[in-house]
Amino acid sequence: MKEIKQIKIKKGMKVSELMKEFKETGVGAKKLGEAADVLELMIKDKECKKFLGISGVLVPAGFKEMIMELLDHVNVLVITGAN
């Protein structure tokens, strides 16, 4: 079984550095760190078709501006009626 390391947050830490720390943890944070790597590859690949799937009540929860910002960077949006 792989050891789960504790996240070390440092003053002036970049988000990319935090994502690398996340990959060494367990459960959700590890998946977030792995997703950051996939996102980086997608951004670098100009031929990559980017899909954004949104479920739940993200707009009423305060994520509308973030979603609108993301729309400039995706090719396909899939969203549930809950929003």
Image (tube, helix red, strand yellow):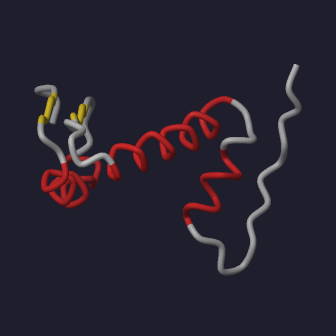
Tell me which residue sits at (24%, 31%) in the image: 53
- The part of the image, by quadrant, that contains residue 39 is top left
The residue lying toward the viewer, choosing from 67 and 82, is 67
Q: Is residue 34 left or right of residue 50?
A: right
Tell me which residue sits at (27%, 55%) in the image: 62
Q: Quadrant of the N terminus?
A: top right
Q: Residue furthest top?
A: 1
Q: Is residue 11 left or right of residue 14?
A: right
Residue 25, image x, y percentages: 74, 39
Residue 68, image x, y percentages: 15, 56
Residue 77, image x, y percentages: 13, 35
The residue lying toward the viewer, choosing from 39 and 32, is 39
Tell me which residue sits at (41%, 45%) in the image: 41
Q: Is residue 6 left or right of residue 11?
A: right
Tell me which residue sits at (42%, 50%) in the image: 40
Q: Quadrant of the C terminus?
A: top left
Is 48 rendered above or below residue 9? above
Labels in figure, total: 0
Residue 16, image x, y percentages: 56, 61
The residue lying toward the viewer, choosing from 42 and 63, is 42
- The part of the image, by quadrant, that contains residue 31 is top right
